[in-house]
Amino acid sequence: MPHVTRRAALAGAAAVLAAPAVVRAAPLEIQFFFPIAAAGPIPKIIDAYARDFEKLHSGIGIKPVYAGSYDDTIAKAITAFKGGHAPPLAMLGAIQVWTLIDLDAIVPFDELATTTEDKQWMAGFFPAFLANGNVDGHTWSIPFQRSTPVLFWNKEAFKEAGLDPEKPPQTWAEQTAMGKKLVVKAGDTVKRWGVQIPGTAGTYWLYQGLAEQAGQQLMSRDGTKTFFNSPGSVEALEYWVSLGKQGIQPPGVVDWGTTPNDFVAGRVAMMWTTTGNLTFVANRAKFRFGVAMLPADKQRGAPTGGANFHVFKTATKTERDAALLFVKWVTTPERAAQWSIDTGYVATRPDAWETTLMKQRVAKLPQAAVARDQLKYAVPELSTHQNQQVTLPLNSALQAALAGTKQPKAALDDAQANAVRVLAPFQRT
């Protein structure tokens, strides 16, 4: 970001006395919350975007603020809003839309992007990624850091187990059967697990994929109802728990953060994780690997995930216009393609996949196209009014079932009862 100092034009002592110093106006600065810690490659990428944008728009400064996890970032953004000093722009979890609308905290993008060109740009994103932010006829957020969960598999481990290395599981039954064959033991010690579906961090996210595959949506689109203990929801959790009971995945709650490391180290043959880990795996795996859509039960299904741009109501008209300018600039097809290549997140616009850059990427790494293709089966990520009060108890219930301290149905009954209580004020007649 350029640094502009105040300059006084001095032509001698007499001139100073005769006229005030000439001051150059400071540029408009747009503070921009982003959900990640300050270390790592992504802040470097975002910082570079800010500098590149500023070179083209000398009157606007973009100041990224790396606010920690998704939960940390939304908490900081809401605190700042309530204090009257929210950032004009923030990258927040797409699931937070109801929370932000209820607080009257954000401006819908369709009120900012009003020209024909603006509307064409706004309509150019994958509908699956727009879905969380499309509420009551408005587009409240713009997709950027987006993902879906996918299945990674170790082709060499498949070959060793006598499985076709080019054929990942298409169904839960196949995943179970293959997973059993892929387990490697040395005495009582497991050297390689068949599959890992991690259960820490946003536990509900991968569970939502299982529920959709069992034919069960977890929430109503108006954010007022959940279906956590419906038959398909219970079936999904029972299947997840069964993987640990059968010794196919580690018993208990598998850690989200260590799962990609376990995979590239060969300690697990298949894993469910975000497509955002594609670049990590591609750069570190010493074996051939594949990426596939999540296996189906009654149907295919996967939630979308990740974060969108939001503009806060406390921003001035000038700040809103500048924020929109930056969001449009950073989501052009070429930049969306480069962001996907650099990070592993899914390029959020179909036209990004038509760029030469992305075509070359897919030709070199066909696995990159799987998450895009899975979008036809994708559903909006679990999002309700009072979202954290609904999802955190659900996460606890899921982890209790995985840990064996509660039966799946009982755990989900508790989560549903909590959700009914929390959402009672929002029921629509």
Image: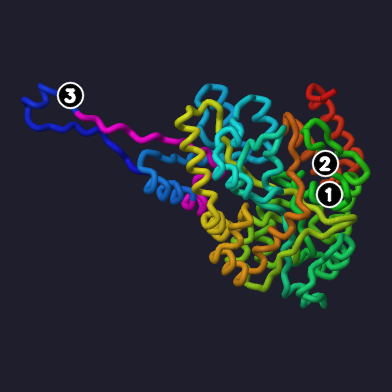
- Do the residues bearing badges 1 and 3 touch, measured as CB atoms within 8 Å? no
Find the magenta span and give its range: 22-45
Rendering coords of residue 230 (x, y %): 91, 40
Verify whether residue 337 appears in magenta.
no
Q: Residue at x 79, y 68 (%)?
A: 168
> Quick one: SS at disc 1?
helix
Q: Is label 1 in contact with label 2 (beta carbons under 8 Å)? A: yes
Q: Where does residue 297 sit, x and y in percent of width and height?
A: 88, 57
Q: How far apart, in angstroms, are the residues tagged by discs 1 and 2?
A: 8 Å
Camera-side residue of 136 and 75: 136
Nearer the observer, 380 or 321 = 321
Distance in Å between CA atoms under marks 1 and 3 = 69 Å
In front of the other: 14 or 75: 14
Q: Which mark is residue 218?
A: 2
Q: Is residue 37 magenta?
A: yes
Q: Quadrant of the C terminus?
A: top right
Q: Count numbered badges in the picture.
A: 3
- At numbered mark 3, what does the secondary structure look like: helix, strand or loop? loop
Classify 162 as above or below 112: below
From the top left corner, tell me how far across and down residue 83 is, in percent: 53, 22
Q: Is residue 306 visible?
A: yes
Circle 2 packing at 10 Å, graded few (<14), some (14-19), many (20+), is many
> Horizontally, is 349 left or right of 245 in the view?
left
- Amino acid at dot 2: Leu
Residue that label 3 marks? 20
89 up-or-down from 20: above or below: below
At 77% from the left edge and 44% from the top edge, which residue is drawn?
204
Vertical relation: 303 (above or below) 194: above
Q: Which residue is mark 1?
A: 212
Corner quadrant of residue 375:
bottom right
Image quadrant in which the N terminus is located: top left
Please report whichever mark, 1 or 3, sits nearer to the chain's N-terminal start.
Answer: 3
